[in-house]
Image: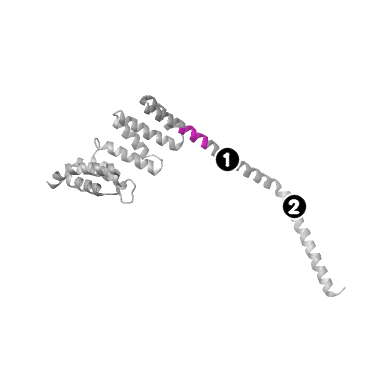
Amino acid sequence: MSEHHEDAATDLLIKEVDEDLRQEQLTKLWKKYANLFVAGAVVLVLAVAGWQAWQAWRTKERLASGERYADALQLAADGKRDEAAQALAKLSVDGTAGYRVLADLKRADLRVQAGDTAGASAIYHAVAAGKADDAYRDIALLKASYLDLDTVDPAIVEKAVQPLAAEDSPWRHSAREILALAARKRGDHAKAADLFRKLADDIAAPEGVRARAAEMLAIEQPKGKG
């Protein structure tokens, strides 16, 4: 056998031995850790199944809460405010997160309709201070602030809504209307007139806000000049 053939045979033998050793090592590793691998696979399957079951449960709960909320709204529309309020109060405790907030906001609206502005304001403030999404919290704060203008120090109301009056705030027009009304409450008619004028001239403001601002401006302008 030539030297070249001997080297090739040697290389082949080494490869075969290496493969045998690797196979033997893999076999030993499998025997040693097989249970862990199987357990890991089982845990993964159970985790996926559990997540899917949890998602299905959440969807079912949201649908149920949605139906209860719709039923409460229908009661309110039918003039059964007390029954609607009771249904909403229960939903605000055991409903899904989003519907708990909606239930609280509607409960507060019903109290406003019933003339209980203090009770409504308390609910709105609770939502504003809670863990709801920012949009819900901002809406609740604005609603509470409108009601608070008649009973709370205007300076406190101004401080509360000032951040929502920023140029990049989607609630800036409502917040600025509250600031104008608060300034009027404090007797600062010049500031109130200025704010109402800017709102009345702001083409980006909602039509209702602009109309109210124009009406208030007609009242405040003479006082502001004086």
Q: Quadrant of residue 177?
A: top left
Q: Quadrant of residue 207?
A: top left
Relative side of 187 to 101, left or right:
left
Q: Which mark is residue 52?
A: 1
Front residue of 37/125: it is 125
Relative side of 113 to 103, left or right:
left
Residue range of the region highlighted in magenta in the rendering = 58-66
Q: Give the residue at the far bottom of this rendering.
A: 3
Front residue of 38/146: it is 146
Q: Compared to 89, does 98 lie above or below?
A: below
Relative side of 16 to 107, left or right:
right
| Residue at 32%, 30% in the rendered image | 111
Q: Quadrant of residue 179?
A: top left
| Residue at 81%, 70% in the rendered image | 8
Q: Secondary structure at mark 2?
A: helix
Report the Cα–Cα distance between label 2 and label 1. Answer: 36 Å
Label located before the other in sequence (2 or 1): 2
Q: Give the residue at the far right of this rendering.
A: 1
Q: Main secondary structure of the magenta part?
A: helix
Instruction: Provide residue 49's location: percent of width, then percent of height.
Output: 60, 40
The disc labelled 2 sits on which kind of residue? Lys
| Residue at 75%, 52% in the rendered image | 27
- Foreground tag (2 vs 1): 1
The disc labelled 1 sits on which kind of residue? Gln
